[in-house]
Amino acid sequence: MNITDRLSHGLDAPICLTWELTYGCNLACVHCLSSSGRRDPRELSTDELFAVVEELAAMQVFYVNIGGGEPTLRPDFWDLLDYCVDHKVGVKFSTNGSRITPEIARRLATSDYVDVQISLDGADAATNDAVRGEGSYDVALTAMQRLADAEFGEFKVSVVVTRDNVDQLDDFLALTKRFGAQLRLTRLRPSGRGAEVWDQLHVTDAQQRSLYRWLLDHPTVLTGDSFFHLSALGEPLPGLNLCGAGRVVCLIDPVGDVYACPFVLHEQFKAGSVRASGGFTAVWRESALFTELREPGSAGACTSCGSFDACRGGCMAAKFFTGIPLDGPDPECVHGHGEAALLAGTGARPPVLAGHSHAGRRAGPVAVAIGRRPA
Amino acid sequence: MTSYTLHPQVGLRDEKFGALAYHYGNRRLTFLNDDKLVTVVRSLDQHDDVDEALAAAGIPAAQWPAYRVALARLVESEILREHH
Amino acid sequence: MTPPAAAAPSDTAETVDDPSVVADADVLADLLVEEISIDGMCGVY
């Protein structure tokens, strides 16, 4: 059995997992996968967070990817970091940078087991702020400078690739080099508020091909295996090239619900709750959803396509939120099968929910906020 | 006589197929696909040299070259360190 | 020392110089150890 098959069948414990600590956020990015903004009154207490850490330590989960919303908004965030490290659970946390003071940067620099990821979606303020809000570029770069000054070492800069920033990849790389950081590119999914902006922001077919070539030319750029659907274009991209959801990774949300991955915050992909009697361990090992995801899947509509072994039918979240059946093609299938499926009208998109977005946001596609500002 | 020890930045976790080793520094994930190999890796500190550990794990001598290659690869990945 | 019945005919140090034995050792080692460099893997942001 090769690595891919072994991992598709699932492991007794995740290798790592995403943990969203809060739905609260001081930004309102147009594509937010978790529709974050307002805290949820039912969020896990500090004691409940610690109990989860103890379970993860017992299962020997190697590390957690902490995010949100903006995780540093929780007053107990720094205690949680320490608790994870003390229990030998590594932490990589994702932040907009607004709470990275020089002192905090110096403190973070002292730990080998904490990794920081600053989110950025444009190589210049205009491009970035159109997605993340006015001033967010400056906040992010200030945080980067502070980490560099504190000699943190290689922190990450994480970019969601969109139609408007895909031409800036060389600029992103130069920016990360300036700060001694590592570049990470991830795929936009039509999840959370991403569903509202998907049509305008997802990369075009031509851009996908150009992105694929760029990734092959820059193998040290991290992707979190986010673009494995592009491996159907030829030489596989570095990484596992498979969907880890429910098999090797999963999501714990701020209220303790466990989902297959952070891009499918939807009842259909909810496996259970850490607050149930068996805790996280029972959900991971026994939930009906994860058991099902670990069954060998059929290629479904992709059976006759020679690329299925390379792309595995693509991303569950991308299919689900564009109304394509899960055994159908990825909406961004490089051979165009996804476009064909969408045109054929295979299914209705799930309704876009407000989630925890700040009140007063305009719902639906927001023409004014998207795209570059006039030069 | 070569002897090795597990790198201090590595987490080693038992699995049905053997074990998973994750290196917190270089982010490499290594699959140890064999229970006897895992036994050897876990017992390295108790033996003066590799061959002693291989023998103690009950590995047939004919397979020792392969296990030595496997252990050398683990040293290359920094999962193991040479112990002087 | 009597070699165990199941052992290869020459299980002393000179086997490592035999190219076919070395090649077999590499092949078997491929089964014993597999490595991959991961960055979160898909499903994590």
Image (tube, rainbow, N blue to C red):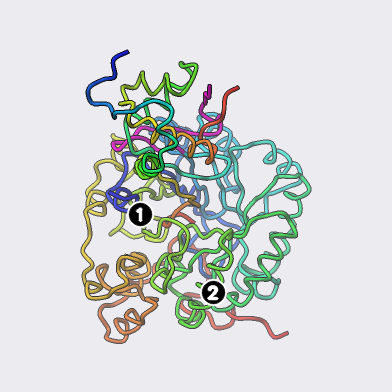
Assign the magenta stretch its main secondary structure.
strand
**Would you say the residues marked 1 and 2 are in contact, meaning their CB atoms lie under 8 Å apart?**
no
Residue B67 seen in the figure: yes
Depth order, front residue of A288/A274? A288
Residue located at (48% from left, 51% from top): C38
User: Whole-percent x and y of residue B66?
Assistant: 38, 36
Q: Quadrant of residue A13?
A: top left
The residue that mark 1 highlights is A245
Image coordinates for residue B81, horizontal then vertical, percent: 56, 30
User: Which region is colored magenta?
Assistant: B1-21
Where residue A273 sits, quadrant-wise, is top left
For the residue marked with disc 2, what is the amino acid?
Thr
* Chain under callout 1: A
Q: Amino acid at mark 1?
A: Ala
Side of B24 where C44 appears, left or right: left
Quadrant the C terminus of chain A occupies: bottom right
User: At x 59% / y 48%, what residue is drawn?
Assistant: A73
Q: Which mark is residue A162?
A: 2
